[in-house]
Image (spheres, helix red, strand yellow):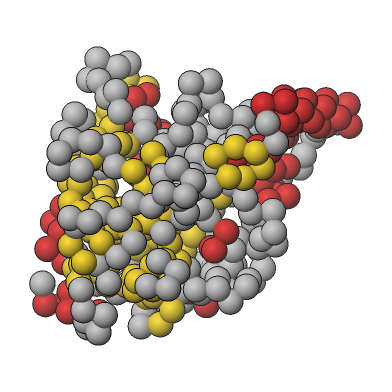
Amino acid sequence: MKMKRVIAGIAAALMAVSALGTAVMAEEGDTCKSYLTGETVPTSIGRTRPVGLMIENDSDAVQWQRGTSYASIMYEAMVEGAITRMEGLFEDYQGASMIMPIRSCRPYYVYFAREFNAHYGHYGQVIYAVPILQLPTTDDIAGIPYGESGQDYVLHDGSSAYIRDHEGVTGIYTNYDLINQEIQESGWSTQYSSGYNGHYNFAEDGQEVNLENGQIAKVVLPGFVYNHPRFDYNESDKLYYRSEFGSAQVDGLNGQQLCYKNIIIQMCPSTMFDDHYLWTDPVNGNEGGTGWFITNGRAEQITWKKENWSADDPIETTISSANVSFDVRECDFNVTRYYDMNGNEITLNQGKTFVEIVRNQDASKVVISDDPSIDTYIIDGL
């Protein structure tokens, strides 16, 4: 872990700035609508930038997952070898003593964090993510801030934000105090950027989105053949409960099964950087892509597109490999907007959202069913 060289005077000044920010937010009102859930929350939470954290999700890691139920939004995408990895976006997580297992970065996850104006935390990274992590506009909390295995680069040193609980790749955790201390000592703003007005449209208090013309969605299978994730709709509380590897996916801190009000399936172009690492494109220029929106037991087809994307936007950096080369523009990190088939931006129900990033070539494996007894493994034959 790195040595912190922040003297008491600077620390006190940072605390004063933080306190001033809280006072300003209090003047705006004690509560606000969360940009992540649409729910009414204390302004000190709802107007403080979230953090995106990489969470390991292979068969060995599930038993060690802690703090996952505190994520307001969860992403899942495929990495190498058909394994999936998750990224949770956390704003109200002071009660989580551990969030783990924190794992390494793949470049597309940085895009997900940045479109929510979030700080980004990870423990390790592939070489193809380095140019994005080194951008001055990326608030990168890197647990391993240097190249390994002969790779020569340096990242922002965020190693003090992580603690090892046990040996092995599943052993690293963090929590609110560790993340907040790193943010303060790095001098990053804790308040949303000027002009940021949120990512999703949410239903107003007392209203529900019911997708009356959508197909019945009692079970959602996102189509990943490694962990076979599954969402089962509960009629009584109108939430989708997640399972994988044949059993409920549970937060080891509190024993709660992960559950969500909204599910978004976002189909994206995907190719290989090289013989090992995957590149899934969450931008796709002006083209965007297709997907599904699922809530309250119904599903409808959608399209998605980056807001205000322009090929004329200045190039910030370039990522190249044996198979792929592409420019990175600031507008790549703009909010992704989702639209129904009439071209209207969708409205989400208030609550947590799970976003499944599915490769275009795996679209046929996505199953949305009205049969609660459907076999999870049906996707293996699709």
Horizontal side of residue 113 vs 302, given as left or right: right
- The residue sitting at 42% across, 73% down in the picture is 236
- The residue sitting at 34% across, 25% down in the picture is 331
Instruction: Give above or below for 228 relative to 192.
Output: below
Q: Front-most of 113 and 26?
A: 26
- The residue sitting at 25% across, 54% down in the picture is 211
Instruction: Give above or below for 192 relative to 236.
Output: above
Instruction: Tell me how many marks there are.
Output: 0
Residue 346 makes an appearance in the image:
yes
- The residue sitting at 30% across, 28% down in the picture is 307
Q: Could you tell me which quadrant the C terminus lies in? A: bottom left
Q: Front-most of 344 and 331?
A: 344
User: Whole-percent x and y of residue 82?
Assistant: 27, 65
Quarter location, residue 283:
top left
User: Whole-percent x and y of residue 86?
Assistant: 42, 58
User: Whole-percent x and y of residue 338?
Assistant: 27, 40
